Image (cartoon, rainbow, N blue to C red):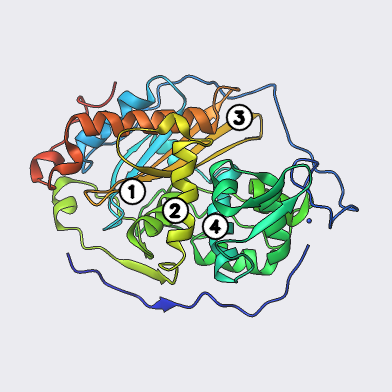
Amino acid sequence: MPAVATGRVSVRPAVASGTSRPAAARTPSSPAAAPPVVAGGPWTEPTFADSTEGDNVDGEDLDIRRAAVEALGRYNGSILTVDPDTGRILSIVNQKLAFSSGFQPCSTIKISVALAGLSEKVIQPADKFRLPGLGRMDLTYALAHSNNYYFATLGEKLGFEKLSFYARLFGYGEKAGLSIAREQPGRFPSAAPRNGGVGMLSSFGEEISQTPLQLAALLSAVANGGTLYYLQYPRNPAEAQSLIPRVKRRLDIAELLPVIKPGMRGAVEFGTAHRAREDGPIAGKTGTCSENGAHLGWFGSFNDTGGRKLTIVVLLTGGRPAGGALAAGIAGNMYRILGEKNYFARPVTSANLISSQICCAE
């Protein structure tokens, strides 16, 4: 399909650096920073719920939806699946949650921070930060194991203005979709958070509200080589078949992806997302934190193969089980289900688009 482009964006702003997280992510350069508060239980959101209630599946790819519903099971959460080569939303389980005002991104913000650091040449592929009590660590290991010290240090080296520039360039604080009526733009703060400063923002996403659509759009750009598509959510099979991809921005990140992907692949192969490991290569990033009485678990991913690609974002909310590791396991189960059905080897056909409310409500 032809893509309609709206311009190319440079990623080289000329802005100054800024400053400062808790014992878990604060660096020696910020000893005077006020100790931040990381909220915990008691949890006010249920861990289990019917996450399909109220969903409209007209226009969805029902093979994708069935796999997502099966993988999510009874957990309270949302699964968003996107074709990274077109920006088409193939399925959203728990549309109410996906179209909410957003949630703290937890450690998934580290993808944006890593891209910003490489773009600004604050870090080079072979660079290692010396971290207290941890020795020297490179980006691949830090991404794979979601190391907070590393990303707090990187965030402070970049400063708030540069972090903000890149985050907004990558889609934070704006709608990811094109004419999706219920979508909300999330939020990116106008200044460094009072709770932990820049270090808390760059390691935990403090004061950011991220929607599943925003994370899916950014990960789709990573998956396809740098094209940030407007996400489009067909309302019926006819719209799905006539969809024309719309380019929001082209990001100059192609040369950075060989540096980013090993850490995202490593997260699945030996790091925080090992529960997502399947036969085919998957790249992803977990996130776990707490917000407003709910424990949050994120996992954003794509199957990093030469065949048909999908971007899958899982967001869980509830009690303590709702974490990034569980979210990764749910995504891995979804990839497995689709793989067993040879989904990744099949072309898109109109037969996949015929929907009924009955098929996927359970």
* Residue underneath mark 2: 261
Q: CA distance from mark 4 to mark 2?
A: 13 Å
Q: CA distance from mark 3 to mark 1?
A: 29 Å
Name which of mark 2 and mark 3 comes first in the sequence. 2
Sequence-wise first label, 3 or 1 = 3
- Residue depicted at x 36% and y 55%: 223
Distance Cα–Cα, label 2 vs label 3: 27 Å
User: Of the numbered discs in the image, which one, if any, rests on residue 112?
Assistant: 4
* SS at mark 1 in the image: loop
The residue tagged 3 is: 295
Asked if residue 233 is positioned above or below residue 298 in the image, the reply reads below
From the top left corner, tell me how far across and down residue 350 is, in percent. 9, 45
Q: CA distance from mark 1 to mark 2?
A: 9 Å
| Residue type beneath disc 1 | Asp
Q: Earlier in the sequence, mark 1 or mark 2?
A: 2
Earlier sequence position, callout 4 versus callout 2: 4
In this rendering, would 18 be left or right of 338? right
Looking at the rendered image, the disc whose residue lies closer to the viewer, 3 or 1, is 1
The three-letter code of the residue at mark 2 reads Lys
Taking the spot 76% from the left edge, 67% from the top edge, the residue there is 18
Q: Nearer the viewer, mark 4 or mark 3?
A: 4
User: Could you classify mark 2 by the number of other residues whose Cα lies within 10 Å: few (under 14), some (14-19), or many (20 or more)?
Assistant: many
Read off the residue under disc 1: 304
Task: Identify whether 230 is placed above or below 36.
Answer: below
Q: Amino acid at mark 3?
A: His
